[in-house]
């Protein structure tokens, strides 16, 4: 696919194939396919929060609420924030007609801080029929676990005259671990398209004349957990979106005067001009020089987004001129071809 690789910047010089042969390194942006592929005919998405504790887990849930100190409904608010953020981000994608929250399905909402058994396809199909959706995103579990640590410290307390004086006190640290996992169900193909876990941490520190007062000074913990949960929901929605990565490549800068001039052109961003000079060396009688020229032409074609042509040049560099770097480069190019095939299928929908 054209224009999937963009030149970013050229940086340092490196050497390989012996001390007399040097290369420069360039960095490019490449587009990777989305981790999760949703079929093009999918228009309606259902989102279910399965993380609500079941009746049989009330005791453990109550213990968790005690450990959460002031956040008795922390899990509830965090899970809701994550699923709403997921919905909003999917709406922002603009590719789906309808995105609904599936609620009041208590028999299916039995989360307990661990990844539950998958929904059966009978259950998934029933939900899809009931809510008129094609694919279901499931927050399979959501749990917050808060650890409390105390230590002696000094706090400043005003006396009767309003002058702050240091007295012995306590410092409390609340470490809240947010654990959650997601699944995507496609009843048409009967495939779980994705299963992914997130782990986030929220840390709050407070001081007071005693542990209870210290805990009271840890403000906005609930808000911090909710904000982190929104980010988690947004991030999970983006798993259906292609993304950019940075890749590096080495190209030859020595061999003949044309390589030296081509290096300067490449350094100014004139890669087409550099390719004109490399092309002149394809017929060089020196096997090493010709091999490097074919290798560099492969680089040029990858920069321009023509991976098929890049593979042709790299193959010839290795097979006809025994350039060992070209063989390693071929593996990279063939991987990019496979990734681009998947990417093209995603972008064509």
Image (spheres, rainbow, N blue to C red):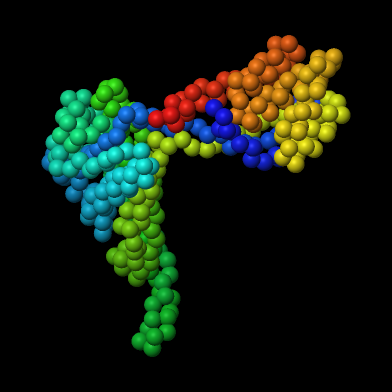
**In which quarter of the view is residue 196 placed?**
top left
Q: Is residue 201 left or right of residue 8?
A: left
The residue at the point 30 percent across, 31 percent down is 42
Q: Which residue occupies the extreme top position in the image? A: 320
The residue at the point 36 percent across, 42 percent down is 94
The residue at the point 50 percent across, 32 percent down is 32
Q: Is residue 211 above or below residue 162?
A: above
Instruction: Tally the numbered discs.
Output: 0
Asked whether residue 233 appears in the rendered view, the answer is: no
Whole-percent x, y for residue 31 in the image: 53, 34
Q: Which residue occupies the extreme bottom position in the image? A: 161
The residue at the point 19 percent across, 27 percent down is 125
**In which quarter of the view is residue 297 placed?**
top right
Whole-percent x, y for residue 148 in the image: 33, 54
The residue nearer to you, when weighing 27 against 224, is 27
**Can you say which quadrant of the picture contains the N terminus?**
top right
Asked whether residue 38 appears in the rendered view, the answer is: yes
Q: Is residue 50 above or below residue 85?
A: above
Q: Is residue 300 left or right of residue 82?
A: right
Whole-percent x, y for residue 260 in the image: 83, 32
**Can you say which quadrant of the picture contains the C terminus?**
top left
Whole-percent x, y for residue 340 in the image: 51, 26
């Amino acid at each position: 696919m054209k224009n999937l690789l963009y030149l970013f910047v050229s940086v340092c010089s490196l050497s390989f194939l012996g001390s007399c042969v040097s290369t420069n390194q360039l960095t490019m942006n490449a587009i990777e396919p989305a981790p999760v592929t949703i079929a093009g005919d999918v228009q309606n998405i259902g989102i279910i929060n399965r993380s609500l504790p079941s009746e049989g887990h009330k005791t453990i849930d109550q213990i968790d609420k005690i450990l959460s100190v002031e956040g008795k409904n922390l899990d509830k608010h965090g899970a809701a924030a994550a699923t709403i953020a997921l919905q909003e981000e999917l709406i922002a994608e603009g590719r789906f007609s309808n995105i609904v929250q599936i609620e009041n399905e208590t028999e299916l909402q039995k989360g307990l801080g661990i990844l539950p058994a998958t929904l059966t396809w009978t259950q998934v199909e029933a939900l899809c029929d009931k809510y008129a959706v094609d694919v279901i995103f499931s927050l399979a579990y959501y749990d917050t676990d808060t650890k409390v640590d105390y230590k002696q410290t000094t706090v400043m307390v005003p006396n009767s005259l309003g002058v702050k004086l240091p007295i012995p006190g306590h410092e409390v640290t609340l470490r809240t671990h947010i654990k959650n996992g997601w699944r995507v169900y496609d009843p048409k193909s009967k495939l779980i398209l994705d299963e992914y876990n997130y782990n986030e941490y929220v840390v709050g520190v407070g001081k007071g004349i005693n542990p209870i007062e210290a805990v009271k000074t840890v403000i906005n913990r609930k808000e911090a957990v909710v904000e982190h949960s929104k980010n988690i929901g947004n991030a999970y929605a983006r798993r259906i979106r292609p993304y950019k990565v940075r890749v590096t490549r080495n190209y030859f800068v020595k061999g003949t005067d044309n390589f030296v001039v081509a290096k300067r052109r490449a350094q100014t961003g004139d890669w087409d001009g550099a390719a004109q000079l490399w092309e002149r060396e394809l017929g060089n009688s020196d096997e090493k020089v010709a091999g490097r020229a074919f290798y560099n032409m492969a680089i040029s074609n990858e920069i321009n987004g023509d991976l098929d042509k890049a593979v042709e040049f790299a193959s010839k560099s290795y097979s006809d001129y025994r350039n060992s770097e070209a063989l390693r480069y071929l593996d990279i190019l063939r991987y990019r071809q496979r990734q681009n095939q998947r990417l093209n299928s995603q972008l064509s929908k």
